[in-house]
Amino acid sequence: MGGPFDLFSELSHPDHKGVTDRQYENRMILQKAMLRGGFLPSGCEWWHFRLENEPYPDTYFEFPVSLQYLHR
């Protein structure tokens, strides 16, 4: 993808031209797939999307995420 997840720099912009052609293509593939799935991209991070029709926009969900929890 041309940069690590959670890197907050110009390199993280989805349309940043300082990555290889392949990395840029991969970013666009991800963006198109997410758009088809009803997500909207963040303008600053190739990995950051939000659900367009969020059913609970004002609700913060807090729950444990662990392998042990998932095996229940």
Image (spheres, helix red, strand yellow):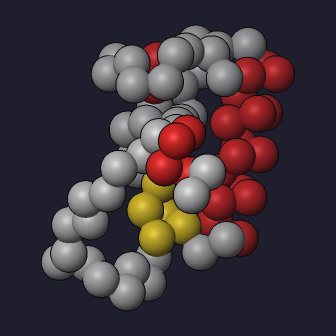
Q: How many marks?
A: 0
State the image quarter where residue 58 is shown.
bottom left
The residue at 71%/28% (across/down) is 24
> Do we see residue 48 in this rendering?
no
State the image quarter where residue 20 is shown.
top right
- Would you place residue 18 above or below residue 27 in this image? above
Residue 59 location in percent, x, y?
Answer: 20, 75
Q: Quadrant of the C terminus?
A: bottom right
The residue at 52%/42% (across/down) is 68
Residue lying at the far front of the rendered structure: 72
- Would you place residue 30 above or below residue 60 in this image? above
> Do we see residue 12 in this rendering?
yes
The residue at 42%/46% (across/down) is 65
Residue 19 location in percent, x, y?
Answer: 64, 14
- Would you place residue 46 above or below residue 10 in this image? below
State the image quarter where residue 3 is shown.
top right
Residue 38 location in percent, x, y?
Answer: 59, 75
Q: Quadrant of the N terminus?
A: top right
Judged left or right of residue 62, residue 10 is right
- Would you place residue 63 above or below residue 5 in this image? below
Please tell me which residue lies in front, 12 or 57. 57
The residue at 79%/20% (across/down) is 21
Residue 2 location in percent, x, y?
Answer: 63, 16
